[in-house]
Amino acid sequence: MRSVLRSVPPLTGRPRTVIAAGPFLAVIVAFAGIYTAVSGRLPDPLATHFRFGGQADGFTSVQGFLAGSLALFLLLGAVVGFLVQLRPAAPEVPWVIAGGYATVVVIGYADCVTLLSNVDAADASAVRVPHWELFLGLAVALCAGALGRLLAGAAPAAPRRPRGAVSRLDLPAAATAGWSRTIASPPLVVLGGLLLAVGLLVGLFADWIASAGLLFGAAVSLPLASVRVTVDRRGLTLAPALLSSRCRFRRIPLDRIEEADSRHIACFAEFGGWGYRIRAGRSGFVLRSGEGIVVRLTNGREFVVTVDDAATAAALLNTYTDRVRSRQGG
């Protein structure tokens, strides 16, 4: 698979948008076609939720099921389309497209199986869905995700700067300076907002216990969606922009820093996703692909944070670490 992906040239702009929209259109057409073919043979309400053993334990009106399914397809398509349009050439976009393929296919498969299982049922409570359908749906979704990743094309390679001399700021010995930037992730903002909205709706109209997981997801996603990165005489600090300045995700003091540099960070290729990531010998807080600070620690590990103007931040860190070493040496 890797050799095939490398042979496919990177795609940007409209081609990727068309590729991303493909499975959503296909699933909607297939779902509408199946409903048209069997609409006269369906009970009302439909059996729409099943226990692992296959017995029906949830029921919905035909019109409610159709409206909910189509709304979910359109919502997922809008989210994927927004992420693709936001930065069409970003390295993580092929994986966003792959995720869209897998998600819409597994949901579409489940909805189509639900319709077909209800055909000619005199009593919806007697409808059964074999448990192997679940595993077959997951297998189909994985194949769809792989197809989406292949069609999306190769992601641009992440350039790596060779290790060597790092820059410093020309700061007078008695002077101090500070640097601060805020990095935001529109995908996490969208995700957190959706989780919050759906969680509130579920809590208001159904059950607050059922909405707890959605609200917890929103509480985790929204603070991570906007982070203030600060470099000063205390070191490197990451704090949520939406919360009090006393709250922080991480602080790396100067005496733990060997040196700092800046380079392009490929979010998915290097860390496998967004957020606080941990890999062998390195960790990082990455909300997008692009320019980032690379801090080499005294224990040999690396810490990475993606942020604009990373070169200035790295140079200031090196200036402050030189001062710490000078004082310790004296």
Image: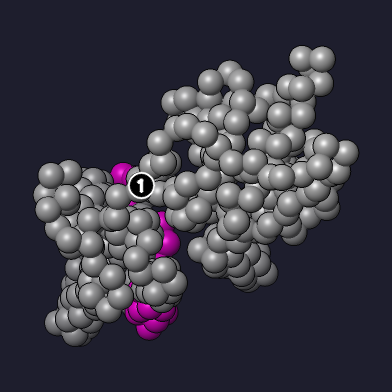
What's the magenta region? 52-74
Of 124 and 204, nearer the camera is 204
Amino acid at dot 1: Pro
Residue at point 44% right, 50% down? 264
**Is residue 103 found left or right of 319 in the rendered image?**
left
Image quarter of residue 66: bottom left
* Up/down of 263 relative to 37, above or below: above
Residue at point 35% right, 56% down? 91
Point out the image quarter for the N terminus. top left
Residue at point 17% right, 61% down? 9
Q: Where is residue 263 in the image (x, y as percent from the top left)?
A: 47, 46
Q: Where is residue 246 in the image (x, y as percent from the top left)?
A: 84, 45
**Secondary structure beneath label 1:** loop
* Up/down of 111 relative to 295, above or below: below
Indicate whether residue 70 is drawn in magenta: yes
Q: Where is residue 53 in the image (x, y as percent from the top left)?
A: 31, 44
Callout 1 crowding tier (Cα within 10 Å): few <14, some 14–19, many ≥20: few
**Is residue 291 found left or right of 175 in the rendered image?**
left
On the image, numbered disc 1 is attached to which residue? 159
Image quarter of residue 238: top right
